[in-house]
Image (spheres, grey):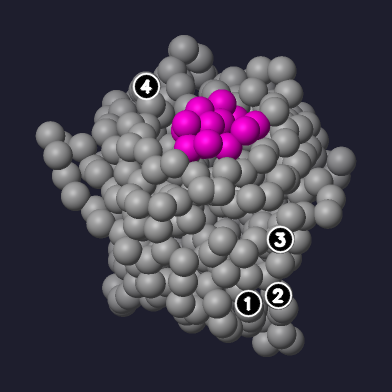
Amino acid sequence: MISHTFAHTGPLKGTIRVPGDKSISHRSLMFAGLAVGESRITGLLEGEDVLATAAAMRAFGAQIERSADGIWTVYGAGVGSLLEPKQALDMGNSGTSTRLLMGLVASHAITATFIGDASLSGRPMKRVIDPLTQMGASIEASAGGTLPLMLRGAAPAVPITYRLPVASAQVKSAVLLAGLNTPGITRVIEPVPTRDHTERMLTGFGATVEVGEENGEKIIAIHCEADLMPCDVVVPGDPSSAAFFMVAASIVPGSDLTIMNVGLNPTRAGLLHVLRQMGADIKEVNPREVGGEPVADLRVRYAPLSGIDVDPAIAPAMIDEFPVLFVAAAIASGTTRTSGLDELRVKESDRLAAMAAALTAAGAQVEEHEDGLSIHGTGGEPLRGTANARVKSLLDHRIAMSMAVAGLVSTGGVEVDDISPINTSFPTFMGLLAEATA
Ligand code: S3P
């Protein structure tokens, strides 16, 4: 455990560049690891979660190398030709690695064991176990449907049509990845749209993916595809990492910060809309496309924020950004109410409970409900908690970084008990924060 105190600071200034998108980085290694031939990945996020995916893809037989200039080269193993890993796959803290790779194994004639840290070992896997079992995989999980678990794939697997019972891009992607090596057509029905990187990127790698709509629900069909083509992927900056700096610059008076190269896929850009609704001053500069994704530089200037009722329909487009939105709400004037956020209880931590406890310790006024928080903001005044309020990050990178941002606007400072989880998604966070507040 490495503790760190984040203290009241002057404005955030200058220009920073956040690392590559975590969701796209995982997928680029997986899809390149399935393609036959050489793929190159530029801008890969080199955080612990993504490195866990790289290690697993190597164990499945892909050759993966990083060159000195930071470009990753992948020679894939081929769909249908994955090797059986010799050891248990250690997924660390990463739910995305676990659930997507379970999908991959489910339609191959191999057996793999998945293990992870204490946080990941408490997270629900039944949501992927159910559809993958329907496709023919056999899975022995720990009590409660959690890791460690052993998955024996089926070859051939059975194509299914699966209607997502929870809005989860990970579950959608697990089924689609299993579908790649399943005879016929596998379909996912998505009542509530979630991030669509899997659909976009698999098409780029040469898979046949059809996206349609019926009765207001999205239907994604994937055809069995023996040959994925290698591809050169350029990973845009992660909007979920940019989020911490978008909020920090919005709430620290005098800030004027430009965040370069931020991915703005509409299925990810919910926070930008919500912050603007609250009165934030965020300009999109030089909008362009990077690796098939919309991207812009964001110029964020301090602006007084007002509390709002956040529309639960926007939740999937900002599901990872709620912890830091709660920090913005704590400094806004008036009350911010959120609802429909049950999924936050099964992330790397129970993010509703974790943020309610941490923000309260830092001096914010928070009410915790079953499916959301109500936060009564200070109206622009700093948080006045006990001196050096000590808060728990609970093996959750986003709690650690959100409370770092809260520390910047607190009179007494916020001590985060363990900042090491930040390395799972944003290894350059501490350096960029020091740079922006210097
Ligand atoms: C992700 C999907 C989301 C998100 C996670 C990354 C992905 O999880 O919270 O950080 O890359 O597919 P859920 O599928 O559980 O909503």
Comes first in the chain, label 4 or label 3: 3
Name the residue that disc number 4 marks.
Answer: 339
Residue drawn at x 66%, y 18% is: 144
| Residue 37, position as x, y percentages in the image | 56, 82
Q: How far apart are the alpha carbons under marks 3 and 1?
A: 16 Å
Residue drawn at x 35%, y 52% is: 184
Name the residue that disc number 3 marks.
Answer: 83
Q: Is disc 4 placed on a helix, strand or loop?
A: loop
Name the residue that disc number 1 marks.
Answer: 74
Q: How far apart are the alpha carbons under marks 4 and 3?
A: 44 Å
Q: How far apart are the alpha carbons under marks 2 and 1?
A: 6 Å
Q: Is disc 2 placed on a helix, strand or loop?
A: strand
Residue drawn at x 35%, y 57% is: 223
Name the residue that disc number 2 marks.
Answer: 63
Comes first in the chain, label 4 or label 1: 1
- Residue 90 or residue 244, whichever sits in front: 90
Comes first in the chain, label 2 or label 1: 2
Location of residue 300 with respect to 100 vertically, above or below: below
The 10 Å Cα crowd at callout 4, few under 14, some 14 to 19, many 20 or more, is: some
**Residue 5 seen in the current view:** no
Q: Is residue 290 left or right of residue 140?
A: left
Tag 4–tag 1 contact (CB < 8 Å): no
> Please, what is the three-letter code of the amino acid marked with disc 1?
Val
